[in-house]
Amino acid sequence: MKQGKIFTKDFIILFSATFFVALIFYLLMTSFALYAVQQFAASESEAGLAVGIFIIGALFARLLAGKYIEVIGRNKLLYSSLILFLIAILFYFFANNLGLLLIIRFIHGMGFGASSTAMSTAVMDMIPYERKGEGTSYFTLSSVFATALGPFLGLYLTQNFDFQQIFIICTIFTVISLILSFFAKIPEAEISEKKLNETKKGFHFQDFIEMKALPISFVMIILGIAYASIISFINVYAIELQLQDAASLFFIVYAIVLLFTRPLTGRLLDIKGDNIVIYPAIIFLTICLVLLSQARVGFVLLLAGAFLALGFGTLVSCGQAIAVKEAPKERVGLAVSTFYICLDGGVGIGPYLIGFIIPYVGFRGMYLILALFVFLTVILYYFLHGKKAAARRKEKEQLQKVL
């Protein structure tokens, strides 16, 4: 049977547009705390808020975008949110106090949350159902490249340029993303008039959350907290270990491993089912955290980066594919939004929660504790989704034998 095509012109365009938006996110995430301190003499907590309020804005936008994306229209939401994203960056040039900066960061986060939801929803609808895992893995490589290049670029630019020049570069990246999106033909959802009116009127929980996507999304909260412990503290931990050179290559290793493994794991998900990918990925993330807790040389730190790719990197792409496959076609946007609300919620709250642990157990103890929690998510996943996925897989195999 001939399979549907993944790499269409529209897929490639939205892949590229997503990359530039994510690149700005990671570039500023690694450098914005320094900007707040240098420009506005912000305290450590205020600088942390200047970074984190972006994610809060993104979460708020994802909630609204998930509900109203099909009402507004995917095209309109994408273009308007990218324009909001651009306006927010332009306002960075005029921010003259910390309060105004926080408002701009919140709005910037809203533009990011809405635009990324719109682009992900459009792409999820473009990917053939029978290749959903593989296609999602390819698409999320856009964020992988940004994860590797963004922090590196943020460090390089802050060392060699002032922040006004950095904001100019971010403006250029946003304009490129906006122009690219105009050339993509974005499919709109086929939704009945009755369903459309219900969406406009309703303010129920299910209007903002896709219940069928919630089980796998809920698992991502814990995994997001674990990821936050790495992205937020890896540099500080590396300084303590005197492994700064290895730490600078950590996300490069992460990206290289993901580049080769994501298409394979996505294809495996489509062919062999959800569990054969998710269970090992949780174990790999556990190994990553254990390695971090025991790291004393650069090689072990970089090996942890490789296992982070096999673990968390796989869980993000395959988890999103599962969320989309579980949801009705007309609620794909809501499924994508639900998944990222939970994931971003974990990543957003992670540094705050972990901050209470580190003074008592140190970085090594913190990573060991998180390794235990991640390992226990095997049980959580089994009851929330794994058991049902296994039964579904067994039914499919029996049906194939009969046919």
Image (cartoon, grey):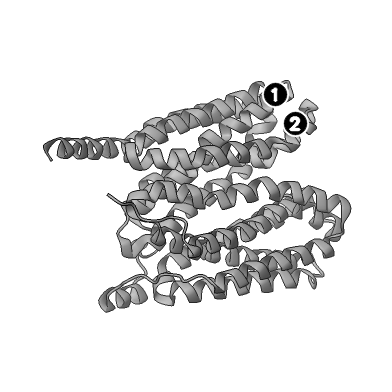
Q: Where is the C terminus found, in terms of image quarters? A: top left
Q: Residues within 10 Å of mark 2 (few under 14, many from 20)?
A: some
Viewer-proximal residue among 402 and 121: 402
- Identity of the residue furthest to the left in this view: 402
Q: Quadrant of residue 255?
A: top right
In this view of the protein, which residue sits in the foreground, 198 or 18? 18
Identity of the amino acid at label 2?
Answer: Ala
- Residue 386 at x, y percent in the picture: 32, 36
Quarter holding residue 383 = top left
Viewer-closest of 41 and 63:
63
> What's the residue at 36%, 57% (across, down)?
210
Q: Could you tell whether 396 is left or right of 321 in the image?
A: left
In the rendered image, which residue does mark 1 sit on? Answer: 299
The numbered dot on residue 61 is none
Q: Is residue 158 above or below residue 241?
A: below
**Residue 361 at least partly seen:** no
Q: Earlier in the sequence, mark 1 or mark 2?
A: 2
List the residue tagged with mark 2. 246
Single out the residue that lies furthest toward the front.
2
When asked about the image quadrant of residue 127, the answer is bottom left
Residue 239 showing in the rendered view: yes
Is the C-beta separation of discs 1 and 2 under 8 Å? yes
In the picture, measured across the screen, residue 335 lies left or right of residue 114, that is left
Q: Pick whichever, 148 or 326, lies toward us.
A: 148
Callout 1 crowding tier (Cα within 10 Å): few <14, some 14–19, many ≥20: few
Q: Position of residue 298 (x, y in %)?
A: 73, 25
Image height check: is 178 above or below 279?
below
Q: Secondary structure at mark 2?
A: helix
Residue at image point 81% right, 49% down: 156
